């Protein structure tokens, strides 16, 4: 059945199973509850969510099918005796493989005492965990030498589920594991060892428990032993164990689902794009906009410039508010939500005392909080990740950038993405302005430095002249200054520019005048010297202005001279509407 959850804003899938409500106490889990639609003690409810354990559901489904099998009775109304008497010969029976030792069989005293520690009151799962912890601490240092290699499979296995031979076999295997070897063993027995580490049985600190879990992964799972889901369970427990015990976040992140960690890292970059490089911002964008964006011709042909433009669009969109007052990031990804978190809920784990109040920041977008013994996880809801608004923004960005850079393979315009156009155009306009500003020659004059140079020159001159020469120089200077008259300002070269200069608003009149001289076959040297321009800077500025329309450099410069690229002469004249002499 499907149900809309107004709190989380998403659709939840649920079902009811007829397998008996006792499983709620035997196998408590966050995804198991009282039935949603059915009534009676034989029904339970199952929620299909991120934490749902598929193996547990399969087991409960099989149990439900078996419990619902057809039942009945056969009533014999008449059964006449058969004629004669049948005599059956005795059949020798093979000795049974006893599950439990016979009376008088040798039981290690430690195991005997351990089994007496089991206390049964309500058969609940917490009681099962408490018994496991009590017995495990009692057997913490026990060693044995009675190997057992049989088959054993049980959900949430504990010592109480094993007979004496299996117990001795497990403790024999554990003895070898503690010495650094990991011989083959039934997977359920290996789970008991992991449960011991989670409960601090056989370790002196949380750090040692985590270290031994790593050794178990290397020695047991990497050797091909265990079932398919064991590594996933182990990593989940290692993360939750690290959070519960306040171990360093960088250690906990090693066991976080890589996909979730990548999402969190990318969200953190998109939250603060000004603090990240263009490459980092673009990679984060691709995580949510889809892998096709990285294959765009804007990036394939434009390289670093294309990546820079994509990153600049997000930086601008991030600071732009929507009509409802949300910034670009919140409009796309929402806000973090806090939800109940049940660490180690799918493991045999006993917490002796409630957790203290804790604030644990796993990364920039995911944190854990404990309040009055209740744990909460705060993160961005999965519903918002990769939201349509974000994808629409970068589809329109890709479309406009392909057109701007003339890459070919243009995309079809979508009317519903029209809102993103002004954001992209604002970035392109800012890039044009910055390019023109960068092309202008930068001359910095320090008056104090000029005065120092003048004084140094006077001192040098005076040191080289005799007294008579100094007197003559002084008289000449006095005469010069007395006759000095204001000099007329140098005549400014006025460009002969037609009205067609509106086609290229990026060029000022002086640049257009120089271009006019070049098209007429004249020398640009007087203009360059009058304005103290560098030839290469002028050529780059004019080429940048024409690149949008022509797509190539229209002027060539060897560092000393500038000349028009002949194949584009007609294109230049066409854009300017012709140039009169």
Image (cartoon, rainbow, N blue to C red):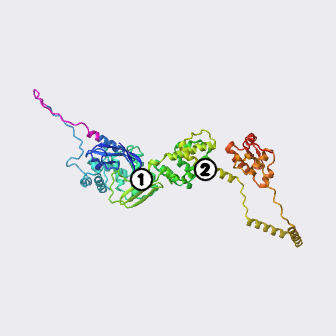
Q: Which of marks 1 and 2 is in front?
A: 2
Which mark identifies residue 383? none
| Mark 1 or mark 2: whose residue is earlier in sequence | 1
Q: Is residue 325 found left or right of 357 in the rendered image? A: right
- Farthest-out residue, top: 83
The percent coordinates of residue 189 (x first, y second) are 33, 47
Local secondary structure at mark 1: helix
The answer to whether residue 123 is visible is yes
Q: Nearer the viewer, residue 131 or 526?
A: 526
Q: Which secondary structure class fits the magenta region best?
A: loop
Q: Write down the residue under mark 1.
A: 239
The percent coordinates of residue 98 (x first, y second) are 23, 43
Q: What stretch is highlighted in magenta?
A: 64-87
Q: Is residue 409 found left or right of 496 in the rendered image? A: left
Quadrant in the picture for the C terminus: top right
Separation (CA) of disc 1 from disc 2: 42 Å
- Tell me what residue is drawn at x 51 percent, y 47 percent: 390
Local secondary structure at mark 2: helix
Q: How crowded is mark 1: few (under 14 residues within 10 Å), some or many (20 or more)?
A: many
- Tell me what residue is drawn at x 41 percent, y 53 percent: 239
Q: Write down the residue under mark 2.
A: 427
């Amino acid at each position: 059945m499907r149900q809309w959850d107004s709190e989380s804003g998403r659709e939840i899938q649920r079902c009811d199973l007829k397998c008996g409500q006792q499983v709620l106490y035997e196998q408590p889990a966050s995804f198991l509850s009282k039935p949603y639609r059915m009534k009676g003690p034989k029904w339970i409810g199952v929620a299909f969510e991120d934490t749902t354990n598929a193996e547990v559901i399969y087991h409960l489904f099989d149990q439900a099918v078996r419990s619902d099998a057809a039942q009945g009775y056969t009533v014999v109304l008449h059964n006449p005796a058969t004629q004669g008497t049948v005599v059956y010969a005795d059949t020798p029976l093979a000795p049974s493989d006893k599950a439990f030792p016979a009376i008088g069989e040798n039981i290690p005293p430690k195991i005997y005492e351990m089994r007496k520690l089991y206390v049964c009151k309500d058969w609940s799962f917490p009681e099962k965990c408490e018994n496991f912890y009590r017995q495990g601490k009692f057997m913490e240092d026990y060693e044995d030498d009675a190997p057992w290699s049989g088959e054993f499979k049980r959900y949430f296995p504990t010592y109480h589920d094993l007979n004496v031979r299996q117990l001795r076999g497990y403790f024999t295997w554990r003895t070898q594991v503690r010495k650094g070897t990991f011989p083959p063993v039934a997977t359920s027995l290996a789970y008991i060892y992991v449960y011991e580490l989670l409960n601090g049985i056989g370790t002196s600190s949380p750090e040692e428990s985590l270290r031994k879990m790593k050794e178990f992964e290397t020695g047991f799972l990497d050797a091909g032993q265990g079932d398919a889901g064991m590594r996933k369970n182990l990593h989940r427990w290692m993360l939750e164990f690290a959070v519960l015990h306040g171990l360093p976040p960088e250690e906990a992140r090693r066991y976080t689902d890589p996909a979730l960690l990548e999402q969190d890292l990318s969200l953190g970059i998109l939250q603060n794009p000004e603090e990240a490089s263009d490459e980092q911002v673009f990679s984060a964008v691709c995580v949510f906009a889809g892998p096709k964006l990285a294959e765009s011709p804007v990036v394939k042909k434009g390289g670093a410039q294309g990546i820079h433009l994509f990153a600049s669009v997000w930086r601008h969109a991030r600071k732009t508010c929507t009509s409802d007052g949300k910034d670009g990031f919140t409009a796309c990804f929402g806000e973090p939500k806090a939800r109940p978190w049940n660490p180690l809920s799918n493991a045999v784990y006993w917490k002796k005392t409630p957790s203290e109040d804790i604030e644990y920041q796993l990364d920039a977008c995911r944190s854990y909080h404990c309040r009055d013994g209740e744990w909460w996880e705060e993160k961005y809801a999965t519903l918002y990740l990769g939201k349509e608004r974000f994808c629409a923004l970068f589809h329109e960005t890709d479309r406009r950038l392909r057109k701007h850079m003339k890459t070919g393979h243009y995309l079809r315009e979508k009317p519903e993405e029209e809102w993103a156009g002004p954001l992209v155009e604002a970035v392109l306009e800012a890039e044009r302005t910055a390019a023109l500003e960068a092309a202008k020659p930068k001359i910095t004059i320090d008056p104090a430095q000029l005065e120092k140079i003048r004084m140094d020159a006077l001192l040098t001159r005076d040191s080289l002249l005799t007294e008579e020469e100094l007197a003559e120089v002084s008289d000449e200077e006095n005469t010069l200054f007395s006759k000095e008259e204001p000099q007329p300002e140098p005549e400014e070269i006025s460009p002969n520019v037609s009205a067609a200069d509106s086609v290229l608003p990026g060029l000022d009149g002086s640049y257009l005048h120089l271009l006019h001289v070049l098209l007429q076959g004249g020398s640009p040297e007087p203009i360059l010297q009058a304005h103290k321009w560098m030839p290469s800077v002028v050529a780059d500025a004019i080429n940048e202005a024409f690149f949008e329309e022509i797509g190539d450099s229209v002027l060539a410069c060897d560092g000393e001279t500038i000349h028009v690229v002949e194949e584009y002469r007609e294109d230049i004249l066409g854009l300017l509407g012709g140039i009169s002499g």
